[in-house]
Amino acid sequence: MDDRQFRTAMGKFATGVTVIATDLDGDVHGMTANAFMSVSLDPKLVVISIGEKARILEKIKQSKTFSVNILAADQQELSMIFAGQLKEHREVEFDRLDGKPVLKGAVAQIACEVSAEHLEGDHTLFIGRVTDIHLEDAEPLVFYSGKYRALVEEKAVTV
Ligand code: FAD
Ligand code: NAD
C-alpha cells in the first residue's frame, strides 16, 4: 500500500479542523490539526497527534500545556495560516483561557494539561486533561478529501 492510498482513505473520514496552540516562555505557537478525539469523560481527557517534523512538538513537550481550538466555518484562513499554507506571515491575536492561548471566534476553546505522551510511528500522541472550556454558538469548519467544506443539515430519518 502506498502513502497516497492511505491518505486518500483517511481523508474519507470527514472531520472538523482545529488549531492546537501552546505557550513556551511567552512565545505562542499554533498548528492546524484534524487528528483530535475525545477520550474519556471521567476524568475529562482528549488526544491530539503531532507529526515528528512539526515545530510545535518540542514546544508542547516542554510547556506540558496546549489548547485545542475547533474552528468556525468562517475561519478557513486561520486553518491555512497555521498549516503553513500562506506565504506571508500574518499576526494572529490570542485570548487566554485558564492561562493557555486560545483563538477568538473558535466554536470551542479547550484548555489542556498534558497528562501522558506516547510515541507511535512518526507521530506523538498527547493525552490532554481538560482544565477549562469556552463555547461559541457558530457553525464548524469541515475537512473532507483534502478540501474545506461546510455542514449541510440532513432531514431526520423517520422510522
Ligand atoms: P510551523 O510550520 O512552524 O507553523 C505553521 C504555520 O503557523 C507557520 O506558517 C507559522 O508562521 C504559523 N504560526 C505559528 N504560530 C503563529 C503565531 N503565533 N502567529 C501567527 N502565525 C503563527 N499535522 C499534524 O502533525 N497533525 C495533524 O493532526 C494535522 N492535521 C492537519 C489538518 C489539516 C486540515 C491540515 C491542512 C494540516 C494538518 N497537519 C497536521 C499538518 C500541519 O498543520 C503542518 O504540517 C504544519 O505546518 C506543521 O506545523 P509546525 O509546528 O511545524 O508549524
Ligand atoms: P491529505 O490527502 O494529505 O490528508 C488526508 C488525510 O490523511 C488527513 O486528514 C489525515 O487523516 C491523513 N494524513 C495525511 N498526512 C498524514 C500524515 N503525515 N500522518 C498521518 N496521517 C496523515 O490532505 P491534504 O489536504 O493534502 O493535507 C494537507 C497537508 O497536511 C499534507 O501535507 C498532510 O500530510 C498534512 N496533514 C497531516 C496530518 C497528520 O499529520 N495527522 C493530518 C492531516 C493533514
Image: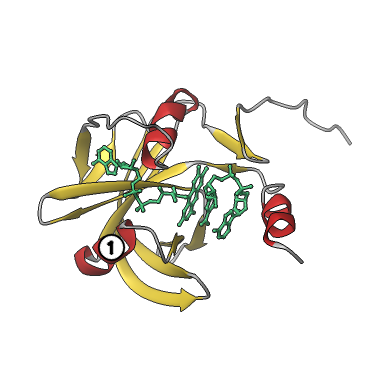
Mark 1 CB within 8 Å of ligand 1: no
Residue bearing the label numbered 1: 60
Location of residue 138 with respect to 58 vertically, above or below = above
Location of the C terminus (image quadrant)? top right
Q: Local crowd at mark 1 within 10 Å, few (<14), some, or many (≥20)?
A: many
Residue located at (77% from left, 67% from top):
1
Residue 104: name its quadrant: top left
On the image, the x and y values in percent for residue 102 come to 27, 41
Residue located at (27% from left, 32% from top):
89
Work out which residue is located at the far right of the displayed protein and give it.
159
Q: How many marks?
A: 1
Location of residue 150 with respect to 51 vertically, above or below = above
Work out which residue is located at the far front of the displayed protein and give it.
87
Any part of residue 43 in sight: no
Residue 9: name its quadrant: bottom right
Residue 69: name its quadrant: top left
Residue located at (51% from left, 27% from top):
139
Task: Give the residue type that dot 1 points to.
Answer: Ile
